[in-house]
Image (cartoon, grey):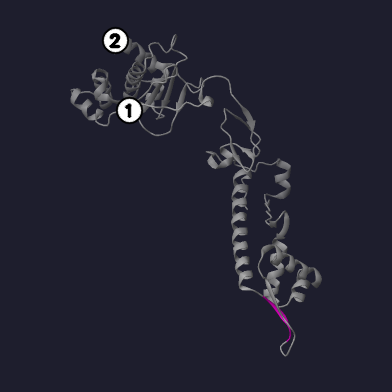
Amino acid sequence: MASALNFETLLQESVKVHGHLCPGQVLGVKMSLLGMRKVGIRDPRSRDKKNLLVFVELDRCATDAIQSVTGCSLGRRTMKFMDYGKMAATFVNIRTGKAVRVSGREDAREKAKNVSNGGEHKYAAQIAAYKIMPEDELFDTMEVDVRLRPEDMPGRPMKRVKCDFCREDIQDMREVYREGKVVCRSCAGGGYYKVRRPFLLPAVVHKCHNDIKIKSKLWIEVGDEPVFGRGRLLLLKEIIRHGSINRAAREVSISYRKAWSYIKAMEERLGITLVVRRAGGKNGGGATLTHEATEFLGRYEEMEAGVREMVDERFRKIFNVRV
């Protein structure tokens, strides 16, 4: 363990960085000394400067102390923040691969009460107790394996790409891929912020009065040939409504011949019978959809609604507009 003088010197340096003395500073300094010793780091500010990597699990006072003692930082890419909300840090010797996780003991606070004389302020008593309590009463340690990826290591960026949606640069291989497109994690759905106005030129926003909408189109192909889409959906629904191919064709503004050719093409490529025609007689002729056709229409409309919902949500997120 480091000498008392060395500890006090490191603690004072840490206080200058953090701004005040608190129990977290004492724990952070002692945690750093313990973790570095366990992984064989003697001097993180000179000889071992490039060999130490620290993963911190809490954005509190102790993290400032760990940065002060170890010299590791986010900017140097030698400190990694893992948002776990735990008083813990893992110290990694990059050269040897040895890694040790040091975590604060849950019973340390209660033990600190027994160490202090009770006459001091709560935090002053904690500080005094933590300074003299042995490491095994303050911390638990365990050897761990940490997978260090090349893109997590210190040094210049290995790669820089541009997000296909927001067009901002992404460094250090933090991009994801969606349907062949490069996407930053924010646009992929993990953003912590929301744009307060549409991501459009002011003139465009002004002209549309924020009444901007997104339209999506869905169709089914068989063998690279369109076989079913919105237009043919409307044709079949008009047949249901009127019981007549001829009347349905007029409603969607196409000829009877074209309507019938659409129906035959759909039946041939989908492999099901869609329309049953009735010959004329006492009650006249007509047409009805088969059970398979009505089931197919229901599934298509369900899929269409799902795609529309997904596109609307994506549009709201990126452009910050109401759909």
Q: Nearer the viewer, residue 92 or 57?
A: 92
Name the main secondary structure of what is drawn in magenta.
Answer: strand
Q: Residue 233: image x %, image y %? A: 69, 65
Q: Residue 237: image x %, image y %? A: 68, 70
* Disc 2 target residue: 3
* Mark nearer the N terminus (1 vs 2): 2
The segment highlighted magenta reads: 284-288
* Disc 1 target residue: 103
Q: Nearer the viewer, residue 232 or 35?
A: 232
Q: Is residue 10 left or right of residue 243?
A: left
Residue 26 makes an appearance in the image: yes
Q: Is residue 231 left or right of residue 81?
A: right
Q: Nearer the viewer, residue 21 or 174?
A: 174
**Who's the residue at 19% across and 23% down the image?**
115
Q: Quadrant of residue 28?
A: top left
Q: Quadrant of residue 240?
A: bottom right
- Identify whether 138 is placed above or below 202: above
Q: Residue 235: image x %, image y %? A: 72, 69
Element class at badge 1: strand
